[in-house]
């Protein structure tokens, strides 16, 4: 299993626009990715409702994981996305 932990750079966290951009990017990878909050709740990263349900705030850490063979590149791409302030773009 591949896994990455990243601090969410968006000041409002994974709400509204940042969550939408993230879930769309996760779906576009074609790799099943699980997003886990610091509280331990896990959701499908490609699900906008799932991502919103985590209530992740700015500066909080989340973990991305996948069992897929080609997951490393997808996880790296998603980590890079979360490392930017998506509200400012």
Image (cartoon, grey):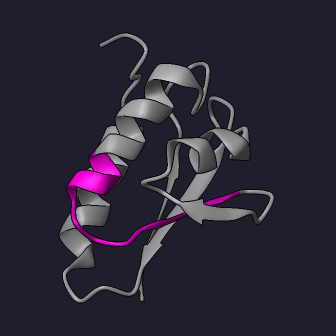
Q: To which quarter of the image does residue 27 belong?
A: bottom left
Residue that extends furthest to the top in the rendered view of this protein: 88
Q: Which is nearer the eye, 39 or 19?
A: 19
Spot occupied by residue 77 in the image (x, y as percentages of width and height): 24, 53
Question: Bounds of the magenta span?
Answer: 25-37
Q: Is residue 64 above or below residue 56?
A: below
Q: Tell me the residue at 53%/38% (across/down).
A: 8
Q: Which corner quadrant holds the N terminus? A: bottom left
In this orientation, does residue 47 appear? yes
From the viewer's perspective, tell me whether residue 84 is left or right of residue 13.
Answer: left
Q: Tell me the residue at 28%/45% (across/down).
A: 25
Spot occupied by residue 64 in the image (x, y as percentages of width and height): 48, 64
Spot occupied by residue 30 in the image (x, y as percentages of width and height): 22, 66
Q: Does the stretch in magenta take in 77?
A: no
Q: Is residue 57 above or below residue 66?
A: above
Q: To which quarter of the image does residue 63 belong?
A: bottom right
Q: Is residue 23 above or below residue 84?
A: below
In this orientation, does residue 83 appear? no
Q: Is residue 30 above or below residue 71?
A: above
Q: Does the stretch in magenta take in 29?
A: yes
Q: Which is nearer the eye, 60 or 16?
A: 16
């Amino acid at each position: 299993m591949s896994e990455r932990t990243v601090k969410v750079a968006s000041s409002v966290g994974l709400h509204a626009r940042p969550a939408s951009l993230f879930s769309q990017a996760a779906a576009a990878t074609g790799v099943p990715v699980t997003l886990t909050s610091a509280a331990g709740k896990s959701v499908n990263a490609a699900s906008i409702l799932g991502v919103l349900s985590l209530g992740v705030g700015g500066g909080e850490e989340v973990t991305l994981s996948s069992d897929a063979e080609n997951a490393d590149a997808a996880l790296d791409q998603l980590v890079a996305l979360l490392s930017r302030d998506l509200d400012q773009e």
